[in-house]
Amino acid sequence: MKTRVRRVSLPNARANAHDHEVTLANRLELPGVADWQRVSPKYVYVDVISTIVVTLVLLVGTSLPALFSGVVWWWILPAVVLVIMIFVIAFVPRRVRAIGFQLRDDDLLFRRGLLFQRFVSVPYGRMQLIDITRGPVSRIVGLSDLHFVTAAASSSVAIPGLPITTAEELRDRLVALAETRRAGL
Amino acid sequence: MTDEAFEGDPIQDLLPAGAVLSTRLADGEWHRLHPATPLLRGGFVFIVIAGYFISSARQQLIDLVLGAPHAHEDGDPVALLTAHGKLPLALLIIAGVLILIVVIFYLSWRVHTFRITDEVVEVRSGLLRRSLRKGRLDRIQGINIVRPFFARLFGAARLEIDVAGHDANVRLDYLSSGNADGLRLDILRLASGTREREAAKAQETKGFVEQRVADFIAPELDPNLAPPESVVKVHIGRLIGSILLHDTTFTLLVLIAAAAVGSAVTGKYFAIYALVPLVFGLGGFLFRRFTKSLRYSIASTPDGIRVGFGLLTLSNETLPPGRIHSIEVRQPILWRLPGWWEIKINRASKSNAKGADAQRNTTILPVGNLDEVLRVLGLLLPGTDEAGIASLRLGIIGRGQDGGFTNSPRRAAIVRPLSLRRNGYAEIPGVLLLRRGAVWRSLTAVPEARAQSIGVSQGPLYRALGLARVHIHTVNGPVRAELGALDRNDALAFFDTASRDVVEAVSTDATHRWRAEGTPA
């Protein structure tokens, strides 16, 4: 799998703060952190199928005004939804490639998002439990989702699209790491 | 209190010679609750029914005594029974039901027992459906003693032990008032991991009435418990002022004014009617806020912070060290005139967060001036030095880079037009600070040892401006620790240092056994 790390030179955060050039380098990228573990490419199918299901539901919902009122202009609503969702689906492969995680010495690093980027760092000692879930589509392609649950609901570290054996290995490894760094709340 | 014999005394055996617990209730044996418990817990309905019956029978009683029966109105059950000559039978049935109820109450009291061991507190109850509730001592988030007005008449108090988790509290209701205080001390001592125990003060025995009176007039906070310089109190004048100047009052007045103007202009009064429920709702909120903050005091004790309040129903809670997950100092807009602030916190236990009562769980200082706020912050963040306090002060009222704050860059003025120079973060030893807002000013402080994870995020607008947002994830509560409109590189630098410092703080944190040997208090 190709890693997509864009190297950005960061001499000094403070000195750089006021004469910052507004460029593509504005994307979030952690300096000096490479080698992200990526999720299975097969997860693209899972994501596409679930997005299509959502799209269909949205289309039905937004078509109701047009169907009931008979006013032609109401069809603009589902049309807009369709265009947006086609874009969303077109970017699924890139979005899936943007999901990554990394087991550092003391914390789990997680990233996701293309348009809305998000990085989270969770110390292993903060683990309350690890959940492995498998949706119907995931099961067909042999994937599962791993949730790293802390006492904070907002942490929400969910690594989707892991092959089942990988997910179980990762769970055992994370549990072992958390055991050695047991901490209170 | 208990009629069980003390055979073995497992915890007492662990203690060094001469050390004793202040009550005999935390000795690892099963104990019973206050004898008035069934009455206080569920007996009020019963009293109401009895009261109705007596008030209804009043006329008959008078007649019986005076021997002058006269006609009664129809519909009164007692009058009806008298008329049909069935009163003795009815009384017999009532007496039977009464005896049955008393027996059930007695039995349920007999089986409702609790014990406190070195590791857990357990409560078992239930006649037919047995239930057992356990709470681990090292997961205790706070211990609350509530003295409802009626229970105070009996000298009883309710002890609520908050354990981390949703509605995971263990309740001991009711205990005798003195026992409740002693037991809390004992539980905290057991939880703190300390092996040295202070000898209990001998309780002087007074008569029942004398003791009840003493309970009522005693100051809410025992002066022996906390050094006076660590006590912050809320005076009633300031409390009233703070409520009059609160944002909710402000909103209420604006709405009333809008409705009045609207009605005057249109000549219709719908707006006023629509406002009535709102006025009741907001007014109720303010009133509860007032009653919940009466006689408010916060003080530092060896086993954590003690928060007490209440006029008729007294309540006080001890929060052991390291149970506060994040702190926010904020200022409703009108409080700027007198310079008042309030402090809210996030905690891991949710037990009391129901409706308006949520306030007592999360508001640690309802109103205070800057000096008091800094004193309370000193209590909440033990280990903060002079420089740290100075940074906190600048975090509350300052702007710019003084105090070690990193501000938003100038190009963020589009998203933070007023608070550009307020918006910023800083780090003092063991604590992360996020400063926000120029009109509604606030400062969020998160102890690093309590942060669950650190995040950084960016959406399309922030990307175009070269900005990013940082998040400190803590347990749920009224405080949201996040800060937007930071320079992208600053945000990444924050993410890097904060995540490393949190790992460091987590590994050295030992507050779950705060007085165990080898760790500083």
Image (tube, rainbow, N blue to C red):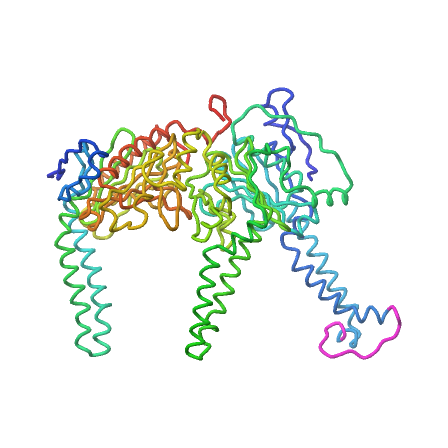
Residue A168 at x, y = what percent?
Answer: 26, 38
**Which residues are drawn in magenta?**
B65-79
Q: Main secondary structure of the magenta part?
A: loop
Q: Is residue B198 left or right of residue B241?
A: right
Q: Is residue B256 above or below residue B14?
A: below
**Is B80 inside the magenta-drawn segment?**
no
Can residue B124 be spotted in the picture?
no
Number of callouts: 0
The residue nearer to you, when weighing B59 against A50, is: B59
Q: Residue furthest front?
A: B337
Residue B363 at x, y = what percent?
Answer: 49, 46
Q: Is residue B490 above or below residue B21?
A: below
**Is B70 inside the magenta-drawn segment?**
yes
**Which corner quadrant of the image does residue A71 belong to?**
bottom left
Q: Residue furthest left?
A: A2
Residue A146 at x, y = what percent?
Answer: 27, 43
Q: Quadrant of the N terminus of chain B?
A: top right
Residue B139 at x, y = what percent?
Answer: 47, 36
Can residue B252 be spotted in the picture?
yes
Q: Residue furthest top?
A: B17
Residue visible at 74% across and 45% down in the picture:
B213
Residue visible at 71% across and 66% down in the picture:
B52
